Image: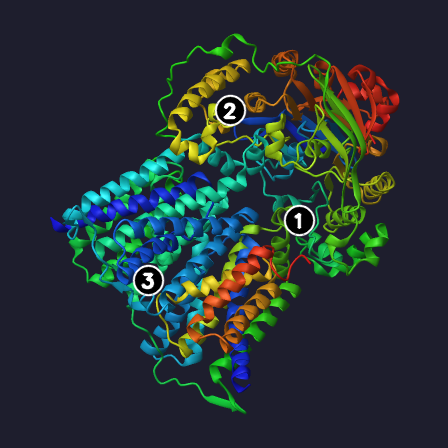
Amino acid sequence: MEYLVHIAVMACLYVILATSFNLLIGFAGLFALSHAAFYAFGAYTTAILSTQAGVPFPIPLLLGVVLTAGVGAIVALPALRIGGHYLVIVTLALQVIVLQVLINGGEFTGGPDGIAGIEKISLFGWRLSSPHTFLPMAIFGAVVCTAIAWRIARSPFGRALKAMRENEAAAQAIGKNIVLMKVIVFAFSAGLAAVAGSLLARYISYVGVDSFSIEETIYILAMVILGGTGNLWGSVVGAIILVLLPELLKFLALPPDIADKMRQVIYGLILIGILLVRPQGILGEHSTAPALARRARKDAHADEEIGTVNGTEPGEVTVSARGLAKSFGGIVAVRNFDIDLRAGTITGLIGPNGAGKTTAFNMLTGFLQPNAGTIELRGRSLVGLKPHQIVREGVARSFQDLKLFTKMTVIENVLVALPDQSGDSITSVFFRPGTVRREEEENFNRAVEILEFVNLADKAHELAENLSYAEEKLLVIARLLATGAEVLLFDEPLSGLDPATLEEIFPIVRRLARSGKTICIIEHNLDVIRGLCDVAVYLDEGHALATGTPDELVSDPELARRYFG
Amino acid sequence: MDLFLQLLLNGFVNGSHYALLGVGFGLIFGTTNIVHFAYGPVYAAGAYSAWTAAALLGFPLFLAGLTGVAAATVLGVASYLLLYRPFVRRDAPTFVVLIASLGLFILLENLIAILFGTDKKVVDGYSAGIHFIGPTFYTDIHIYQIASLMILGLALAAFLRLTNYGKAIQAMTDNADMARVIGIDTNKVSILVFAIGSAISAVPAVLILLRDGALPNMGFIAVFVAFLAVVVGGVGSILGAVLGGFLLGMVENVGMWQIPTEWQSTIAFIVLFFVLLVRPQGLFKGT
Amino acid sequence: MSEQLLAVERLSVGYGKKTVVHEVDLGLAEREILIVLGHNGAGKTTLMQAIFGLIRTQSGRVLYRGEPITGRKPADNVLGGIAYVPQGHGIFRSLTVRANLELGAFVVRDRSRLEEDMETVFEMFPILRERATQIGGTLSGGQQQMLAIGMALMHKPSVMILDEPSIGLAPNLVERVMRSIQTINREFGTAILMVEQNVRYGLPIAQRAAVLKTGRKVYDGPPEPLEDRVELMKLF
């Protein structure tokens, strides 16, 4: 019985480790291999403070969390610059360094022997010295930590994390500060792992390096993968299964060291097996999505035409760029480019391949910095701002290759793009839950309205990757609309669509223009330019060669000649 | 000064060891883009097979070494065919393949421990000759470690340059899609690099067996330094892996001149940690 | 259709549930140059990749010398005499010009003719001879494109599929590249299937033209009517 309770305590600790690791790799898509090192940081902070300074619970735990979160934030620095394999090797190096420091730390860390005699937790005169007495503490810890992770995962911030995982450029293009998000999620993931470490130290009164090896990270990884990345309940399930499963080995009466190795062999087999058979894990990312039926509350937006820009005169110039220039390694992509975009007007940007159309968009939206020239939105300069700042100023863009958040639902794609969400701030998520919830309800309704506007409401809970070609394009429009920006730049929004579908989508874009939006479209299918645009700008060799109605430009023999090289 | 010379020599020897590990790992990684973590336990399996052949079956040392190479080659190719290929075929994301390789890593490492036990295995009756140049000393194993890098490195370079399959490997490392376009069977080439890379890893493994003995967890540090050498040197460059390995060996040993022994690896890793922060594309690439 | 060297019948291609190319028919006769035009995103590259076996088809079939080759591995297509020059300088950037050309002949078993074949390529593109020991990635864009075409020539194909060989090249180079494609067609009798945006230099060398619009064929016939650019614009 005592042993069963011990297993339950360990399951609680691993629930903390698995859910916090999932936050990092499953939600944020940051593949780091240093979780055991964070775990160790928490454990050793408690061990050292308790044995050497006699600091009572819970101060070492809290200090450990803060310290480890700080280390996590520092580890995020390489993640800002590099991704993929490089993050793997950098975090692996951190793991190795931490272990070596612990082994070589002499008296301070106890060296290879570790630190024994850590004081048990005493609460209200109770000393939590047996598994029975510690279990409530472990459950409490697991519940609190999982609740924190759950709160993050289910918040607008968590949704933004997933968007960043799916596509960093697109996340920036809807106004998310991905640098800050990476630092925060690393800090939280590390800090939560430190809680598990601290509890472990108190529970077994001992910490040693063997508990925090790379194999430990793989063990926790196996729990996350088994349960399903991007699903916190999956991690809870995965942790419990992988703590319980090896106990079956007890029936085989193997020698202890063999049993320990068998345990790890099983983890390896499970990891490989689940990836081959069910890569999404036992619970896939969306199998526990919240119930869909939220009451659609009638609110202020309802009567207003969607996308209405208040205080705009039709025809008024909103974006004005002068003398833009950009070259790449001596090759001039755009030179002396002037353009005025007007409210309520759909401007087409046409020209041969390589004329610099997308480069122009990239400069207007901060994805590239111009070598020269000015860009103003209603007189405010946009030059030098980051993409996410320009979106907040009111200029948003879509991408040629769509960059939808494919593993998120249609409505999530729209929700994540809505502006000014207090839930994007981690402090609001925890300290202003009421505001965040209220806003979420409003945002949900708003997102439904936007989806209705583009005729996608019936697909709201479909994954974006399951949409048809035409529906994907509609979702791009919806996501861009959701940013609330008054200037919408579409990079080939309708390419590959057949004429019948185009006729269905045109009215949507026209209505947007009528409501006061400033719209600019790059398109190679000239049917789209002819059918949609009020005015067209012909770009050739990085320069605006002519401006006129689409029909004028398209039937100009000289421009036609240039169009085909 | 004597100490410094000794450290320099040690750095060179260990650098050769790391460089050879890096060459094998880098060949696989650069060509297939698979982070083959199980390279570590495959390396360990090479050492254990050689030990089995020498200590249990009484093979002469050279033959035992070849047994180790053969075993590692078979295991390496099997890990590609049985584990990685199904993922490659279904275009699985790279991190899925990486996780699978971690699974294989922990699986193989512990199987070795179960089969052979966790005590250190040494080849009895072998003792390496010790030689002196002035005050600095070196052993036969040190010679073998340097020589194996030179021989295998040159042989690999010749293979890559002169043979058709070598050129196919270079082509696939450069651009796998283009390799398919000109008619290269990328699956065959992948099998080949797993075979060569694993065979190469067994050589330093056997030498470490003779020098320090074998432990089941010897693979982790091997794959870690190999990965580090490759990333520091620049992915896709064999010469880069060699230079990365030498840099690692040198920083580690020369650092010991001023720093206590037990911190040597830590210092080296911290240095490389910052190198990666500043130059993620690798030191010797893309200048 | 039986005398066609390469034929595509009601071919549909796409990714996942999405279809990019819809039931396209296309035929290429021996020694013919066929140019495929169309706006960006019309499905031209997708169609070429599917013909060569780089991506899977959804329905329809591809015939080569009357035999179905739908979904055959690129390696087998190269062996069978089909060459593919992908968009954007399909070369190995880290290898020398010579090594690139040798790799172009990767499937050729008979190595004795290697030097001779390379000589043929050098005669066509003398600049490559001068740069033979230079690393591919350091060549100019035009030289890289010549090298890419040279690589395809190395295995003496009956059909050469080119995906926008002029992309990113200055006008004088476009003309140069088009002329060499014409020479290949005349001297070696290689049939050419070419996707091209540069109508000015591409169209004159073609014997037949096809235009794709949003994944469907909207024109297939002689190139001359398309010389009227305003008319051509209507097909874009």
Q: Residues within 10 Å of mark 1 (few under 14, many from 20)?
A: many
Amino acid type indicated by mark 2: Val
Q: Secondary structure at mark 1?
A: loop
Q: Amino acid at mark 3?
A: Val
Please tell me if label 3 and label 1 are on a single chain.
no
Give the quadrant of residue C40.
Answer: top right
Question: How crowded is the residue under tag 2: few (<14 C-alpha within 10 Å), some, or many (20+)?
Answer: many
Q: Position of residue A415 (x, y in %)?
A: 48, 25
Judge depth for marks 3 and 1 and give the one in front: 3
- Asked if residue C56 is positioned above or below residue C83 in the image, the reply reads above
Marked residue nearer the N-terminal end (2 or 3):
3
Q: Is residue B7 shown above or below C226? A: below
- The residue that label 3 is drawn on is A209
Mark 1 vs mark 2, foreground winner is 2
Q: Position of residue C217 (x, y in %)?
A: 69, 23
Q: Amino acid at mark 1?
A: Ile
